[in-house]
Amino acid sequence: MSAPTTTRTTPSATTGRAAARLTAVSKAYGDTRVLDAIDLTIAPGEFVAVLGPSGTGKTTLLRLLNGFEKPDAGEILVPPRVTTVYQEPRLVPAHRVLRNVLLGQRRTKGNKSAALAALTEVGLERHARSWPATLSGGEAQRVALARALVRDPQLLLLDEPFAALDALTRLRMHDLLDRLRERHRPAILLVTHDIDEAIRLADRIVMLRSGSVAIDVRIDVEHPRTITDPRVVDLRERLLGELGIDPNPTKENP
Amino acid sequence: MTAALDATPRTDRADAGEPADADRTAVTLARPRFLGSRKRSRTLSVTLRFAVPIALLTVWQVASSAGWLDPQILSSPGSVVQAAEELWESGQLTDFLAASGRRAAIGVTLGVAVGLVLGILSGISALGEDLIDPTMQMYRAVPFLALVPLLLSWFGVGEGFKIVLIAVSAVAPMYAYTYLGVRGVDRKVVEAARGYGLSGARLVAQVILPSALPNILMALRICLSVSLTGLIAAEQIGTTTGIGYLVSLSQQYFRNDYMVLCIVLYAVIGVLIDLGIRVVERLAMPWRSGVAAR
């Protein structure tokens, strides 16, 4: 990636050019320290993927940014508009699709047409009057994406949003997310278990280990990225190594 | 995966990114508004639970001793306690409670058994639903007190009538909630259990009943409260024991202290029922400790 990458690589705490900032944030549940004095700054428009084994505080990080949890120590700063897409669509079954996209907003004409536009963006305008129960998993998740984007978030939190989808649908969702990102350019924090997904989508990968940042790496590989690109292969091996997995059995020969 | 990634058409991020970035420089950051649930201390919770009943009692006591309350309207707490002592010393209080308790226990057990079986049959099979549900919905609409004359003519004024009346009152709520509970059991879990060879009574006992237990226990709560109403009706006639008899006695002799005592007794029984069900919930549903069915 070119010019903007370099400006985004130096999000400085002093200039205030950040879409979210965590300073020395700690969180423990009982005796388990889930996050241990973690520092993380996300620049406006930056796409950060957070990787890490289960129980390393990935989801806690999102819950903190959402305000569902309070940090034990440290400071969390977020922009006014933060939205989330969860692993499950979390649509209200009693509301039709359009009304789900409007959730929490006034049902004014303007908001309705914005919601319809958001549904059009995710290719579901024909389903505006459908009930959530009649949608497939991928469709429901696209509605959840539309619901998150219609508020024009400055920070979009994605909590393993594609984990429950089949592989093909997941790839389509990656493309969709790419396109939506071009248009809206929110800062994005994606929590995922999928290293390939992280490499495919993100500008920067943060790997957590026992509550701290183990790796914080920028991906300076232009899009579209191929997993045969030597830089991608190197990064992939490094991330897998950090997870304690031997990358060679799954490595593909260029 | 490679092919799909390679094929992805992509616009240049540099062009799209720069102006958007500039726009967002002005964003002011703030701490996220706390949306989680606040932790409440157990002491505070217990205190609050007792606070309202104690406050009501205090107001009652103060109003009585200050002379604002005419004893003919509402007896003082002291005289109600006195009435209780009177009955206690004569042994009637224990006799009454034992007699009512026995009637309620047998009646509720019968009613709950019938309601439970019908509810399960109706909940698990379409045939059962077709056969049972319409009739039960009609039955549910009939106030059980309307059956008193009929039951009296069938069973006379003895114990049988009283027990049957309470049983009849318990069937409908038990049926309705069991049916709902069984219908609400996760179909996928049932399907998996069938796949692993469970069927019939074993399926019901091992999968369906445990999953429907929250509803069933809620039904039990309601049945027990309804049985108190049944007791008042049943014990108006042909008996000289029971708290329902006490109610009609106090009315007959216009003893305000006894009237209030009856209400207090019902309230205490209500609390005991609640505590009992909570204990059962804790023992029977260890997987959802702390989540009481209400």
Image: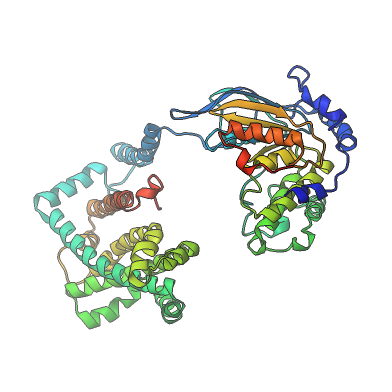
Q: Is residue A251 visible?
A: yes
Rendered view: A3 above or below B229: above
Rendered view: B5 above or below B21: below
Q: Nearer the viewer, residue B256 or A146?
A: A146
**Residue B153's x, y, as percent?**
24, 82
Rendered view: B142 above or below A218: below
Display coloring: rainbow
Residue sitting farthest toward the left:
B90
**Residue A234's x, y, as percent?**
70, 33
Q: Is residue A240 left or right of residue A169?
A: left
Rendered view: B67 above or below A116: above
Quadrant assignment, res B190: bottom left
Q: Is residue B30 visible?
A: no
What is the number of callouts on the image? Answer: 0
Quadrant assignment, res B145: bottom left
Q: Is residue B47 left or right of residue A176?
A: left
Residue sitting farthest toward the top:
A14
Q: Nearer the viewer, residue A246 or A112?
A: A246
**Residue B259's x, y, as percent?**
26, 55
**Residue A15's x, y, as percent?**
78, 19
Q: Nearer the viewer, residue A30 or B290?
A: A30
Residue drawn at x 79%, y 42% as measured from the top left: A181
Residue sitting farthest toward the front:
A253
